[in-house]
Image (cartoon, helix red, strand yellow):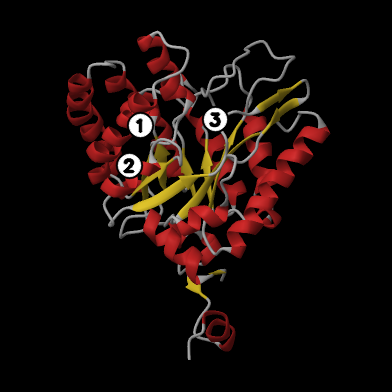
Amino acid sequence: MTTLSPGKLWGMRRMADQNGRFKMVAVDQRPPIKNPIKAARGTAEAPYEDVAGFKLMLVRELQAEASAMLLDPHFALPQGLSVLSPAKGLIVTLEDSIFRETPGGRLSSEIDDWSVEKIKRCGGDAVKVLAWYRPDADLSVNLAQQDFTRRIGDACARYDIPFLFELLVYPLARDTHQTTDYVEMQGKHAHHVLDSVREFAKPEYGIDVFKLESPVPAKGIGDADRTLTQKLFNEMGALCGRPWVMLSAGASMAEFKTVMEYAYAAGASGYLAGRAIWAEPFKAFPDWDAIRSGLRGRSVPYMAELNALTDQAGLPWFDHPLYGGKAGVEHPDASFRHRYGVM
């Protein structure tokens, strides 16, 4: 049976509800929030108060249905920390939303002057990192992405905090569907998703929870071959080797709920989603009253539906085979007492 260090165990418990299922809301999006605001305002950059104000509204309105909230350090965390309930888990973003596009693929990096240590110091219960990855990108790019991830995994182990890792495939220069937007890649191949999971499931990366996209396009998933789709989800779940949740990648409410049905049948432990929950009300920007009304009238009831499905079909994270159905913690042996000063 795999055991968890005290900090990682506590962080995993903080992210989940009391039954071990993850019901997490992403409020860390930057381009998907900044770009519509910029367009609506007709400005070169999205006003800080608009971006931060919308994120604060999301925390206020959605946290009651969530087990944890994912905040970014620039816009969501400064004010959100004061309104987020202490009963909710706090996940904090580490990666910069501005990636480097090269002829051979995308390169990720941390936010300047931000680190795993600082996330731990500000009270974070987990570190979230998104890494763009294509198994068929240039070798030098993939090695850099692997080193980036491995370095963060090492830091999370050092500071004893869970590492929540998000993977997204993306178009290479030779692909037809080109975009730098944070949306599901059109024409993506299932084997790119599965091979990416296979790589980062290796113990050397130190990942505690995977945040994954659907192995088949979420758009139109209701029309997909159910047997084949479930087989791909099952393979993805088997490859993880640890608890995993699903991301929404801009899918509609109906599409994401269908994605979750497949995911739970394959052993997922919950969701970490943003736009599937709040994108529709956000279309009313800059009418703040309409946005708030939409969050209360559409997003909150939708989360209640997702949560009911999660309660019914989601696998508690501590029941994952990695933990033998009983997640252990390193205590109360001599190494624990020595490390933490327990006499």
Q: Amino acid type of disc 3?
A: Leu
Please report the residue visible at 64 percent of the width from the left and 37 percent of the height from the top: 194
Residue 103 lies left or right of residue 241; in this view the side is right
- Alpha-carbon neighbours of circle 1 within 10 Å: few (<14), some, or many (≥20)? many
Viewport quadrant of the N terminus = bottom right
Above or below residue 320? Residue 56 is above
- Given contact means CB atoms under 8 Å apart, are the residues at marks 2 and 1 in contact? yes
Q: Which residue is mark 1?
A: 52
Horizontal and vertical percent position of residue 115? 57, 50
The local crowd at label 3, few if under 14, some if 14 to 19, many if 20 or more residues have their Cα within 10 Å, is few
Label drawn at residue 117? none
Query: How packed is label 2: few (under 14 Cα within 10 Å), some, or many (20 or more)?
Result: some
Residue type at mark 1 is Ala
Pointer 2 residue: 79
Depth check, mark 1 against mark 3: the one in front is: 1
Residue at point 38%, 17% (across, down) = 37
Secondary structure type for disc 1: helix
Residue 116 lies, with reference to residue 3, above or below; the image says above
Q: CA distance from mark 2 to mark 1?
A: 8 Å
Along the polypeptide, which appears first: circle 1 or circle 3?
1
